[in-house]
Amino acid sequence: MEENKDIKIIRKAATELKLPLWRDALDEYIGRFVAQSWSVQHLMAVMMQDQLKMRADNRRRTLIKRADFPQLKYLGDLIVDELPDDARTALPLLRSLDFVRQGRNLVLYGNPGTGKTHIATALGIEACTQGMTVMFTSVPRLITQIKEARQERALRSLENRFINYDLVICDEFGYVSCDKEAGELLFNHLSLRAGKKSIIITTNLAFNRWSEIIADKVLVTAMVDRLTHKAVLLNMTGESFRMKETKKILQNQL
């Protein structure tokens, strides 16, 4: 049966206006309109709400993909009772992402396996859900990107992108040492966001041990001062989740 003229006009207009849900689900909407005796106003309200939700979902997926998280870890997956004390106390406030809106940094420090990367990733995904732009990178990877951009005379472009993210997550600070040049490049790059935009840092080293990976003590002092100014600091020292899982497996084998 051939569609009437009005339906054709609506489908064509929906395509040109980039309203795919209106175009593809039009017959369903009309069916519900007739079956449930909707008013025209209610029909329009439902169609608009559905289209807005679809756009929000698409934007969230796009933002998460562009953030380049190595794994998708969510706040709801955290076993809160097993987190270190600082994290349990701070998590309700961190969920609000007010620290991101205020341009404050978050530093999670402590031994490996206590949930630092999980919390950082989950907060990043929550930020994407709320429409914020996020970049996830490891510190060694970021240093490599900075060096390559400088060699290719594209450092300014990299810096502009780095500044404009609502949130940058720098994972694994302290796992790989860096020479004086790399330390200076990292410091200068991170300083671009100081007092303006939020950075989340995860590190396995307490601040008084950062000189173990960057030889220049003056640079380390400046970096700690810049990153921790008005920052949220979480001591994540505790028993490793992975070690707990290993112990459980060994106990089950006995």
Image: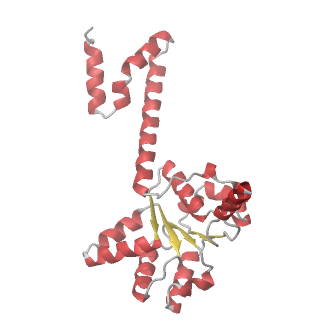
Farthest residue to the front: give it.
254
**What's the residue at 53%, 66% (across, down)?**
103
**What's the residue at 53%, 91% (across, down)?**
217
| Left or right for 243, reference 29 | right
Picture quarter with the C terminus? bottom right
Position of residue 28 relative to residue 244, above or below, is above
38, 152: nearer the viewer = 152
Position of residue 32 relative to residue 24, above or below, is above
**What's the residue at 48%, 82% (across, down)?**
177
| Left or right for 148, reference 180 | left
141, 120: nearer the viewer = 141
**Residue 72: horizontal and vertical position, in percent?**
51, 52
| Left or right for 246, reference 193 | right
**What's the residue at 46%, 60% (across, down)?**
166
178, 207: nearer the viewer = 178
Picture quarter with the N terminus? top left
**Residue 22: horizontal and vertical position, in percent?**
37, 26
Position of residue 9 relative to residue 4, above or below, is below
